[in-house]
Amino acid sequence: MGHERGADECLAEAGTVGEIVNVGQVVESGEPVYLVEFGNCVVGCTEDEIAPAPAGLLFEQGAPS
């Protein structure tokens, strides 16, 4: 499995580009939880911890090359 991290260790710096690989839900609140892959590490993120990648940063299907 992956590298174990300490309780206070940063999992991904703000602005790091990741890919949403799965979406779950907190049972008690119904809040969505996004599993985001950052290279070799997958982190559970809440909706307020993620944002769309800025336009032009990633290759998008159908975009002019």
Image (cartoon, rainbow, N blue to C red):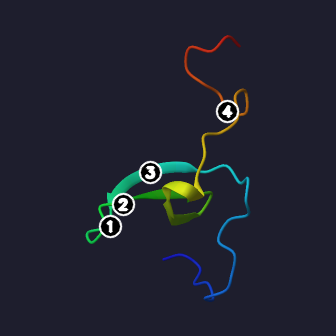
Q: Secondary structure at mark 1?
A: loop
Marks 3 and 1 sit apart, C-alpha to C-alpha, by 17 Å
Observer-nearest of 16 and 65: 16
Q: Looking at the image, is mark 1 or mark 2 earlier in the sequence?
A: 1
Residue 2 screen position, x and y as percent: 54, 75
What's the residue type where badge 4 is placed? Answer: Leu
The residue under label 3 is 21
Any mark on residue 26, and which?
A: 1
Asked if marks 1 and 4 touch (Cβ < 8 Å), the reply is no
Q: Is residue 26 left or right of residue 53?
A: left
What's the residue type where badge 1 is placed? Answer: Val
The residue that appears at 45% across and 59% down in the rendered structure is 35
The residue that appears at 62% across and 15% down in the rendered structure is 63
The residue that appears at 70% across and 35% down in the rendered structure is 54
Give the image quarter of residue 14.
bottom right
Number of numbered discs on residues: 4
Residue 25, relative to residue 4: is it above or below?
Answer: above
Asked if marks 2 and 4 touch (Cβ < 8 Å), the reply is no
Observer-nearest of 49 and 15: 49
Marks 2 and 4 sit apart, C-alpha to C-alpha, by 27 Å
Q: Is residue 30 left or right of residue 14?
A: left
Observer-nearest of 53 and 49: 49
Residue 9, relative to residue 65: is it above or below?
Answer: below
Callout in the foreground (3, 1): 1
Q: Looking at the image, is mark 4 or mark 3 earlier in the sequence?
A: 3
Q: Looking at the image, is mark 2 or mark 4 earlier in the sequence?
A: 2
The residue under label 2 is 31
Marks 4 and 3 sit apart, C-alpha to C-alpha, by 16 Å
Residue 44 screen position, x and y as percent: 48, 65
